[in-house]
Image (tube, rainbow, N blue to C red):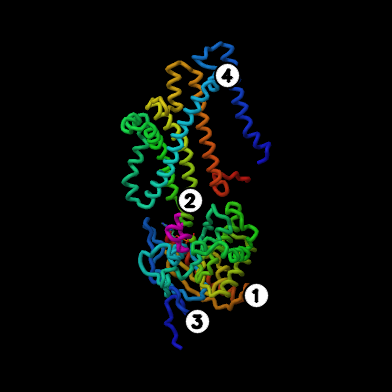
Amino acid sequence: MNLRQRLLIVLPPIAVGIMIVIAWELLCRAYEVPSYLFPAPSAVVRSLVENASDLLFALWMTVRVTLIALALSIVLGTLVAFIFVQSPIIERSFFPYAIILQVTPIVAVAPLIIILVKNTQVALIFCATIIAIFPIISNTTIGLRTIDRGHRNLFLINHASRWQSLCYLQIPSALPFFFAGLRVASGLSLIGAVVAEFVAGTGGRSAGLAFEILQAGYQLEIPRMFAALFLITMTGIALFLVVAGLTHLALATWHDSMIKRET
Amino acid sequence: MIQPPASLSSSDRPSAAKLLLRIDQVKKTFNNDVTALSDVSLDIHAGEFVSLLGPSGCGKSTLLALIGGLGSPTEGTIDWQQSMYDAEGHPERAIGFVFQEPTLLPWRTVFENVYLPLKLAGVSRAAARDQVMDGLRQVGLSAFADAYPRQLSGGMKMRTSIARALIRKPQILLMDEPFAALDEITRTKLSLELLEVFAKTKLTVVFVTHSVYESVFLSNRIVVMTARPGRILADYPIDAPYPRDDEYRTSVQYNEYCRKVSGALKEALRSADTIDA
Ligand SMILES: Nc1ncnc2c1ncn2[C@@H]1O[C@H](COP(=O)(O)OP(=O)(O)OP(=O)(O)O)[C@@H](O)[C@H]1O
Ligand SMILES: [Mg+2]
């Protein structure tokens, strides 16, 4: 791709974004909307700057919970998937419970977890992990299972050991599925972190962005609410981009989903 | 010298040929109640180039997979006359298998795909390098060593797969329609190269094909199977000396064999019609 083509991909959405922000600002000014109802972008930016230290600290808290939960989901989720694949009986015994984790709304269980787990940070991480882990488990399990029969035969004919089949066949075959799961899980871990924090509603030294939003709501500091919201969204986008970049690194050379066909 | 008893399947085999593999009354029924093979008996001797012909779906691929140990017969036995493993439990006999599909690993380059059997046998990449490059040269793909399978044409993929099957210098080579996807020129070239490898190393080949001409040109024995469930209908020795060249292709003998095999194949297809009707 040359520079021109790249710009053609990147520029239009940026242009749309800029136009929306300008229109928003102009409309707010034209109709003199009070900023405690719906703040103009300039008010949000001002609030962001004024409360920078508080907001950035809250951001760090939320990001920390999100990343720890995501890392735990990846490690535990793939581990569980490997165990499931090694033993069908274990999978049959435990998979229904993995589904229960998935279908129970996190908002409904979060209060219980927060009561049971003393340390709030740990409780938040726990909630976010519960919701992020399922896509990793299910996708990686399917991926480790979905092995081309011809490839399996190839490894059999060459007397590959179980370990060799795992490293050179099963894991590479599972990577596209794993990354599809990771993409979903990265979004869910942030959602989990924010939702759990809402439920916990704790302030103090470990308050995250959700607490900032709650707090700003009580005090009708709407611009500050928008600023916190903005930071959450940015975090989500950053996570998405990082995962997309990792996926690209792992699959770009060979996987069909990554290849732009010229014919 | 004592003549070995003439087996059911082969009449005038050179008496010196060592029995490599005995397939005895093999039946294969899949889970879905499809019986692919019924009562197949076949002795394969070292140094034979056996072609398997038969209508589509008659169980040729199934038979080849059973020989390769990729499944076990429902009834009957497949006995190697030597053990599969040496005293220390290492696989002794390398089997080369060219599957009907190229089955290349998409995440590995052409070089790495051909190197794979050696890698699985514990040979380091550095030690295997020259051998792999030689193998690629043999199939005319040395310029594509670093390409990924998706960048290859169908025929190039198949050639990679052939190079991979040969890389461990197997004692027996099982090939499932390896040349079906190739153009005429490449096919001729690779046929001649296969015969060269066959002559040079003491290779035994079991070769599935749909082409009567290809089988008569390449093999020294042709086995024709009936439609599903596959049985052995005919078993012809092709007694033309190697090396074979274009002269053989135009000889009376060649044409005579082609006529005979075509006749048997027609009969096999007729059996297919009566079954489907
Ligand atoms: N894994 C399987 N499970 C169920 N049925 C199978 C399986 N593999 C093959 N069969 C059936 O067994 C029969 C023989 O299949 P096989 O692939 O051996 O035929 P073939 O002679 O190689 O045909 P072709 O020339 O078209 O490649 C077919 O009817 C097929 O449907
Ligand atoms: Mg077949």
For label 2, count other residues whose C-alpha is less than 10 Å away and answer few (under 14), some (14-19) or many (20+). Answer: many
Q: Amino acid at mark 3?
A: Pro
In this rendering, the label closer to the viewer, 3 or 4: 4
Q: Chain of mark 4?
A: A
Question: Is B173 or A28 nearer to us in this picture?
Answer: A28
For label 3, the residue is B14
Q: Is residue A56 left or right of residue B134?
A: left
**In the figure, A149 relative to A244: above or below?**
below
Residue at mark 3 to residue at mark 1: CA–CA distance: 24 Å
Judged from the image, the secondary structure of the residue bearing numbered disc 4 is helix
Camera-near label (1 vs 4) is 4
Q: Write the residue at 43% across / 27% down.
A: A207
Residue A219: give x, y in percent of width and height.
Answer: 44, 16
Per the rendering, the mark at residue B247 is: 1
Q: Amino acid at mark 1?
A: Glu
Task: Estimate the spatial distance between the alpha carbons at disc 3 and disc 4, rounded to whole Å.
Answer: 95 Å
Establish whether labels 3 and 1 are both on one chain. yes
Tell me whether circle 3 and circle 1 mark residues in contact (CB < 8 Å).
no
Q: Nearer the viewer, residue B90 or A61?
A: A61
Q: Amino acid at mark 4?
A: Ser
Q: Is residue A97 left or right of residue A39?
A: left
Measured Cα–Cα span from mark 3 to mark 2: 47 Å
Q: Which residue is mark 2?
A: A173
Discs 1, 4: same chain = no
Front position among marks 3 and 1 = 3
Q: Amino acid at mark 2?
A: Ser
The answer to whether residue A69 is above or below residue A92 is above
Stretch in magenta: A152-166
The chain letter for the residue carrying disc 2 is A
Q: Residues within 10 Å of mark 4 (few under 14, many from 20)?
A: some
